[in-house]
Amino acid sequence: MNKAKVGEKPLVVVTHSLGTLVFKRILEYANKGDPRLESLKQNLKGVVFIAGPNKGISFIDSFKEDLKVACYMPRFDSLGSLAVSQEEALDYFLATLYYSKTTYYMARRLKTRLEKLQENFDKMKIKGMTISEGQPSRIGPTRTKVMIVDKAEAVMEGYPNVHIESKNHSETNKIRNKDDPTLIAVSKFIDESFGQGKGTKG
């Protein structure tokens, strides 16, 4: 960030999914007085958290068994008894590798810290907004439909939320056209953050 000179000029940061936790952690360091983040702290006008797990990631509970199996599968050729194709096995392995080793462990380890991360964000009095997903995503070899981060987990108390009913988790940060609801919400927030519209908490 320093090499890219991020924070030397006024800016609005937009994060997606687990990027929410990463940026909140950066803000935690900034609020503790890290000199490398002082300019970012001073010039940050607002933050948009898109489909971010501000209060947790409950969907992993429904995949405990799938994740457990995936973590202990030694080789693809051992999947014969599961009656799935090699393509399905590869898809299953990649999906569960990501969700088990990234989402599962990060969610479990950080869950106890989510409130502290939010408390720090509140103390910094930064303008903020959340965007929540309205459609389930298909996960695993059976393409089971689950809400990755539901609305209750994405919203932050006291901050505005834009719920996009037509998009799932991975689609919330994709811009399709000029009338895209994500683009409209983020653009409006940026205008407000730079004093061109009605303000938000912060």
Image: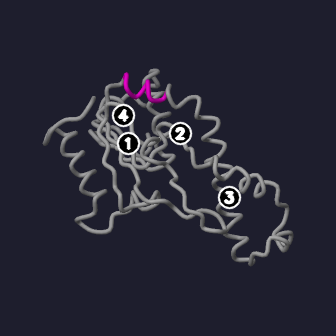
Task: Inspect the image, locate mark 1, and give the three-letter code of the amino acid beneath it.
Answer: Lys
Whether tag 4 and tag 1 are in contact, CB under 8 A, the answer is no
Residue furthest out toward the left = 196
The residue at which mark 2 appears reads as 56
Question: x and y percent of residue 24 in the render?
Answer: 46, 35
Which stretch appears magenta? 117-123
Query: Element under label 2?
Result: loop
Image quarter in which the N terminus is found: top left
The answer to which of 153 and 101 lies nearer the viewer is 153
User: In this rendering, is residue 174 above or below 3?
Assistant: below
Task: Inspect the image, locate mark 4, and give the three-letter code of the amino acid beneath it.
Answer: Leu
Quick one: label 2 or label 4, which is nearer the N terminus?
4
| Residue at the (32%, 41%) spot, across then down | 129
Question: x and y percent of residue 23 in the render?
Answer: 46, 39
Query: Element under label 4?
Result: helix
The residue at which mark 1 appears reads as 5
Q: Is residue 174 left or right of residue 145?
A: left
Single out the mark in the foreground, 3 or 1: 3
Residue 96, numbered label: 3
Task: Inspect the image, locate mark 3, and give the three-letter code of the amino acid beneath it.
Answer: Thr
User: In this rendering, is residue 185 above or below 81?
Assistant: above
Dot 1: within a 10 Å radius of its alpha carbon, few (fewer than 14), some, or many (20 or more) residues? few
Query: Element under label 1?
Result: loop
Single out the mark in the foreground, 2 or 1: 2
